[in-house]
Amino acid sequence: MGPSIGKSSTGQELVISRLSEILKTAEPETAWTVEELMPTGGSSLVTGKPKAGKSTTARQIAVCVSQGNSFLERPTRI
């Protein structure tokens, strides 16, 4: 880790890091609600033109997840 440059308004220490150091760190494994489509614990957007089926798709995802069924052949989990 690089040198400390002070504290943020929330009291967290601010540190300067080299890009090479950042790239060496492993990314945490992503947990998925719908495999490779909808991450767990985050926000997802369903976008499209009016009357394209966004609401129907969102409802179908909710039903599949709540019943433990796959969605578009992708496993789901709560």
Image (cartoon, rainbow, N blue to C red):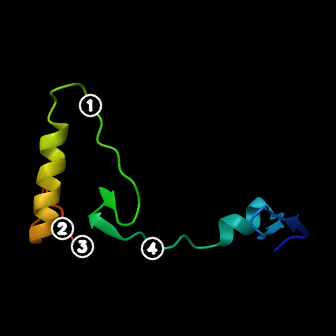
Alpha carbons under labels 1 and 2: distance apart: 24 Å
Q: Are marks 2 and 3 in contact (CB under 8 Å)?
A: no
* Alpha carbon separation for disc pair 2 and 3: 11 Å
Location of residue 50 in the rendering, given as x and y in whole percent from the top left corner? 21, 25
Quadrant in which residue 17 is drawn: bottom right
Residue that mark 3 sits on: 78
Q: Residue at x 18, y 62 (%)?
A: 74
Mark 1 and mark 2 in contact? Answer it, CB < 8 Å: no
Mark nearest the camera among 2 and 3 is 3
Residue 21 vs residue 71: left or right?
right
Q: Amino acid at mark 1?
A: Gly
Can you tell which mark lies on residue 75? 2
- Residue farthest toward the top in the current orientation of the protein: 50
Disc on the earlier residue, 4 or 3: 4
Residue at 16%, 58% in the rendered image:
62
Residue 55 position in % (x across, y down): 17, 41
In the image, which disc is placed on residue 27? none
Q: Residue at x 15, y 45 (%)?
A: 57
Between discs 4 and 1, the one toward the N terminus: 4
- SS at mark 4 in the image: loop
Residue mark closest to the camera, 4 vs 1? 1
Q: Secondary structure at mark 3?
A: loop
Q: Earlier in the sequence, mark 3 or mark 1?
A: 1
| In front of the other: 18 or 59 | 59
Q: Nearer the viewer, residue 20 or 51?
A: 51
Give the residue at mark 4: 29
Q: Amino acid at mark 2?
A: Pro
Residue at the disc numbered 1: 48
* Residue 75 place in picture, x, y as percent: 18, 67
Q: Amino acid at mark 3?
A: Ile
**Spatial CA span between label 4 and label 2:** 17 Å
Neighbours of disc 2 within 10 Å: few (<14), some (14-19), many (20+)? some
